[in-house]
Image: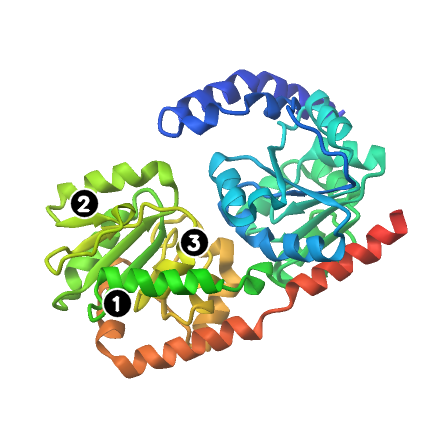
Amino acid sequence: MRRFLYTMALYLLVPGALWHLWRRSRKQPEYLEHVGERFGRYPFEIAAPLIWIHAVSVGETRAAEPLVKAFSERYPDHRILLTHTTPTGRATGEQLFGDRVARAYLPYDLPFAVNRFLDHFAPSIGVLMETEIWFNVAHACAKRQVPLFLVNARLSERSARGYGRLAGLTRAALRSLRGIAAQTQADAGRLSALGATGVEITGNLKFDIAPSSEMESRGRELRALFGPSRPILLAASTREGEEPLVLDAFERIGIPDVLLVIVPRHPQRFDEVARLLDARGLKWRRRSTGDTVPADVRAVLGDSMGEMFAYYGACDVAFIGGSLLPLGGQNLIEACAMGRPVLIGPHTFNFSEATDLAVEAGAAVRVADSAELGAQAALVLSDAALRDRMSSAAAAFAAAHRGATARTLQLIESRWSRAR
């Protein structure tokens, strides 16, 4: 009965979902592409045995990279289907994997659409990334005996409270899963409190993402374009409302020739941030022009996709966005893997354990607000010895926490084999 009521509510929300697609398409036209897939209609087929991985958007898609590689090496006779919810996630999948994987949207959690999806692709196994608990998807997979796993699972206290409001549905969905690989003890505890059984702690897959030689080379190229001797502050993955705070902090740094490189989290906001830079009266350039940045230019707008490792490679210190406002923060692991000192705001509930460990290791410094961000950025940029200590600590921190891919794959194979 609970699932029936949930499903009826979803049907009532379909017009709103279509309105949402249209509204988002005004800034990002890709939202009106492949709409049929959101209802289980797909224009292509896959004949080979299929491993299905669902990664909602950019962060989940990047996190899936080491797992996709591991599956490809271990099961070369299987085709991998990567499903998404957002166009940016889909674009990230294309950049990372090209034609090595198939891509599609996962349909809305409506029974007819979910059944069409499963009928069409007939996956041998399903893997949901991070915080994706879809009640009808879980029910349909269990009914068809498709082993479904939740991996790299993280669940903040806020999300746990939300799922707790649908306690019966959540418990049934979690218990229908073949296995759950949690990032941390806290995540495992919250999932178990919601009714999950057999949860294992495997760590964070993002620690296993290594920068490619191409990204390292591109980082050196960006550094040459930005100015080899200029102090460079990167504001990575900034969210709406944060850029004014970052610019306030930048104005407080007071170091001659310092360059701000600001990379918004969502590409549809590039033009919005460009207007903000104009309104502040800053002389700035777009990264996409590929031009050398003149000495009198104070800011660069990182309006390119798939270059985050290169941006980290080109900077002296990185502020990780989503953390100055109560948005939960973004992933700091990539910056640490590149050996860059990290500054992070007070709001990191989406990545709380990784952030706390990085701060404890001396790889990152937490700031309370915009004013402290400016002060700490000035301190790190002006103190070469401090910068070197934080860089070494960041690289060591990232290296010490690798291995989640192997542990996750071991969990999946141990429970998948029982189902075959």
The answer for how far apart the CA atoms under marks 1 and 2 are is 20 Å
* Whole-percent x, y for residue 44 in the image: 66, 27
* Left or right: where 396 falls relative to 100: left
What's under tag 3, amino acid-wise? Gly
Residue 169 in view here: yes
Q: Earlier in the sequence, mark 1 or mark 3?
A: 3
For disc 1, the marked residue is: 377
Q: Earlier in the sequence, mark 1 or mark 2?
A: 2
* Left or right: where 254 falls relative to 67: left
Nearest-to-viewer mark from 1 and 2: 2
Q: Secondary structure at mark 2?
A: helix
Label 1 packing within 10 angstroms: few (<14), some (14-19), many (20+): many
What's under tag 1, amino acid-wise? Ala
For disc 2, the marked residue is: 277
Image vertical order of residue 399 relative to residue 118, above or below:
below
The answer for how far apart the CA atoms under marks 1 and 3 are is 18 Å
Any mark on residue 92, and which? none
Q: Residue at x 37, y 40 (%)?
A: 267
Q: Residue at x 33, y 42 (%)?
A: 240
Label 3 packing within 10 angstroms: few (<14), some (14-19), many (20+): many
What's under tag 2, amino acid-wise? Leu
Residue 336, picture quadrant: bottom left
Q: Residue at x 69, y 53 (%)?
A: 72
For disc 3, the marked residue is: 329
Q: Residue at x 80, y 44 (%)?
A: 147
User: Which residue is farthest bottom?
Assistant: 385
Q: Secondary structure at mark 1?
A: helix
Coloring basis for residues: rainbow
